[in-house]
Amino acid sequence: MQVDSPRGTEPSSGPPEAAREEGALARLGIRFTNWAERWFPDAFVFVAIAVVVVALGALANGAPVLAVTKSFGDGFWSLIPFTMQMAFVTIGGYVVATSPPVQRLIDRMAMIPKTGRGAVGFVAAMTMLSSFLSWGLSLIFGGLLAKALARRTDLRMDYRAAGAAAYLGLGATWALGLSSSAAQLQANPKSLPPNLLAITGVIPFSETIFLWQSILVAAVLFVISVIIATVSAPGPASAVTAQDLGVDPAREEERTPPPAQPGEWLEHWPILSILLVLLGGTWIVQEFARQSWMTAISNLNTYNLIFITLGLLLHWRPINFLKAVARSVPATAGILIQFPLYAAISAMLTGAKNAAGTSVSDVITHAFVSLNTTGSFPVAMGVYSAVLGFFVPSGGGKWLLEAPYVMQAANELKVHLGWAVMVYNAAEALPNLINPFFMLPLLGVLGLKARDIVGFSFLQLIVHLPVVLFLLWALAFTLTYHPPVMP
């Protein structure tokens, strides 16, 4: 899956002194992404291969052919509610980020930094803060902020470094925030496949993203990422600006023509938006009034309705809201077609059993348990999740693939189940820093290619990896195992 650069040529690496300032790691990262863009197929190919591998594994484990096919078919449609919920995370974040009031806010924020390097650090900080609310919001918001800064004639900012900073929300902190796919799944029993619910039970936000240990990991990653983004950004003499790269950062103004026919008046009538906002807003208030805010926000339906309602209000006219939704829909294609396959994989892992009643998940669980102790499990799971994440770039989908056996292993090794979810979350984000798949919406906003920004994000990965693994290991000792809680 490629994103063509509007400049029509290969990206410039800047003058020699700029390349030297980036250092060997950045150059290695650029070479790596050049290779990945040439040889890596679309993520759908990886999930299709995973389906075949798991099916063959179940057959090799002695499961009957009919049991394997039945598990595949039964599991395929078991995750439709969650699939749509994840699609709406993308749509809601995009609609809010592209609304006129948020665009004006971004323009005002772009006047704050005083230097090019400071601007890159500012993009990193704002992008990661927005990622705690929504990864869909973070990608678009960060890209628009980087473009707004690039429009400043008094600020010589390296556009590639700013683009990499705009990606840090998804590459560093999103899975530790409210839109964490794994944490949302585990907090919503109706969204969980029955086979996984039987292993993990319900794990509320208070036991995952709102653990003080999880908040500490997020804070450490936030500070480190901002420092690296600022320090690694080229100075004014060697910065490669958007104009140097042939990118025009001017805001794309889309004016909606006035209604030409009577039927079009309703599309421009803000009263319809206001009425919908009142209905949705009243329901949201009721949800927060009848339960704790932590329980309310952990419900994906409530979470998504907040963003959709806010998007309606910020776009004001129905026609503008609908146009924003239409622009966001292409970014949901991977979610819509791949998540059912992930659900089918999860079902085959646990449901296709041999004559002895053993599944592929049981075999992998035994391997995890035999090779690990309670102390080593967080590091082993973190490394495994990070490596697998490069080939399966989907936080929620990959959780369905991993969770049946890693969570069963966590039960047997007496590892805090909520922390096991956060181990997955922190490690799962690491490969995003160099994986082109989730860069695509951001690159479309920036007008760049993945190879333009991955040199800088690769530097982040080099530092994040040991820090994350150490924190996952050390903080595990501060938590105590509790058996699964069933709904």
Image (cartoon, helix red, strand yellow):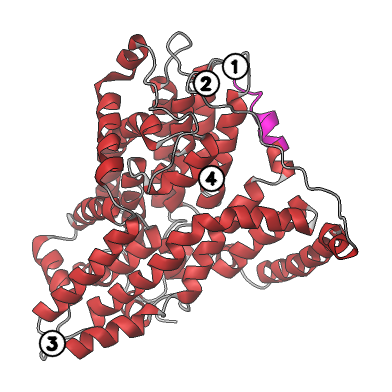
- Residue type marked 1: Lys
Check the image and report above or below for 185 versus 152.
Answer: below
Task: Name the disc covering residue 114, or none.
Answer: 1
Q: Look at the numbered discs 3 and 4 and tell me whether their residues touch, using CB distance below 8 Å.
A: no
Q: Alpha-carbon distance for marks 3 and 2?
A: 60 Å
Q: Amino acid at mark 3?
A: Asn
Pointer 1 with pointer 2, Cβ within 8 A = yes
Give the vertical position of 383 relative to 346 (above or below): above
| Residue 171: x %, y % from top left | 40, 43
Per the image, label 2 sits on a secondary structure element best described as helix
Which quadrant of the structure image shows residue 273? bottom right
Q: Is 401 positioned to the left or the right of 122 in the image? A: left
Q: How crowded is the residue under tag 2: few (<14 C-alpha within 10 Å), some, or many (20+)? A: some
Magenta-tinted stretch: 104-113
Instruction: Provide the residue designation for mark 4.
Output: 138
* Above or below 447: residue 57: below
**Which one is nearer the viewer's eye here, 357 or 242?**
242
Which labelled disc corresponds to residue 118? Answer: 2
Q: CA distance from mark 4 to mark 2?
A: 19 Å
User: CA separation, marks 3 and 4?
Assistant: 45 Å
Disc 4 marks which amino acid? Ser
